[in-house]
Amino acid sequence: DAKTTQPNSMESNEEEPVHLPCNHSTISGTDYIHWYRQLPSQGPEYVIHGLTSNVNNRMASLAIAEDRKSSTLILHRATLRDAAVYYCILRQTGANNLFFGTGTRLTVIP
Amino acid sequence: GAGVSQSPRYKVAKRGQDVALRCDPISGHVSLFWYQQALGQGPEFLTYFQNEAQLDKSGLPSDRFFAERPEGSVSTLKIQRTQQEDSAVYLCASTLSGPVGELFFGEGSRLTVL
């Protein structure tokens, strides 16, 4: 499985933007970049995914570096409900599973 | 229900007992996955079904773990002769088509083996 590297933890003040980084230097040309998050005592929840271009949806934005070796998940205004573990995952074409790693634990400070 | 449903939410077993964990995927979802999540770790893949066919069981840690989905809908994960290292949250996920789609996870079944 192609691996990703994320900081173990980050903090953000409520209502401020949050930039969660992810390094994936061994990404291959057909790997999609997926982000999931896991709130306490819940299963993971899909956030966003992309291949080459930046992506936006109602939850977040995904900024992908031109060489695709890194990406950043952007939460535009953090709320207390965004406190979770965020996983950056490379989805390999034809793979049956997602490799989650340990993710980044985001703490939102009121 | 609208989401993936798992039962029981909590299970305590004595070492050596057999346990069965149930997953009801979203109606119409073809693909179903089981993951194991140890405390403080990310989920780890166990097995994958497409309809009733188990296409990948490479993540099952031992032959004590068995999963089935006989009618292509509900799935059961069975663990025989449980051991303390089996203590974890077992997550089920489903997706509409093949493995490439967005995964919808249940809340998980927390197994504690004493």
Image (tube, rainbow, N blue to C red):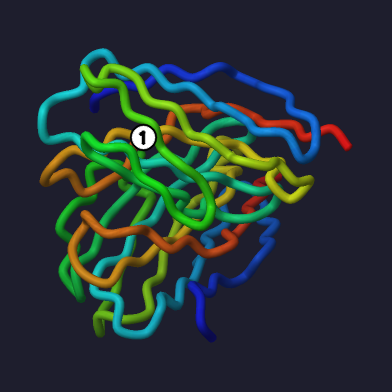
Q: Which quadrant is the C terminus of chain A positioned in?
A: top right
Position in image of residue A60 (x %, y %): 51, 46
Q: Which quadrant is the N terminus of chain A positioned in?
A: top left
Position in image of residue B52 (x %, y %): 20, 75
Q: Tell which residue pokes out farthest to the top in this image.
A: A25
Q: Quadrant of residue B25?
A: bottom left
Question: Residue at point 37% right, 59% down?
Answer: B103
Please state which of residues A95 and A30 is positioned toward the viewer in this rendering: A30
Position in image of residue A102 (x %, y %): 51, 27
Position in image of residue B40 (x %, y %): 63, 31
Badge 1 crowding class, 10 Å Cα cut-off, few under 14, some 14 to 19, many 20 or more, is many
Q: What residue did someone put label 1 on?
A: A89
Asked if residue B49 is positioned above or below residue A49 in the image, the reply reads below
Asked if residue B70 is positioned above or below residue B43 in the image, the reply reads below
Asked if residue B27 is positioned above or below residue A19 in the image, the reply reads below
Can residue B62 be spotted in the picture?
A: no
Question: Residue at point 34% right, 47% down?
Answer: B46
Tag 1 subunit: A
Residue type for callout 1: Ile
Please state which of residues A78 and A5 is positioned toward the viewer in this rendering: A78
Please state which of residues B49 and A59 is positioned toward the viewer in this rendering: A59
Asked if residue B74 is positioned above or below residue B49 in the image, the reply reads below
Left or right? Give the position of B13 relative to A70: right
Q: How many marks?
A: 1
Question: Residue at point 16% right, 69% down?
Answer: B53
Disc 1, SS: strand
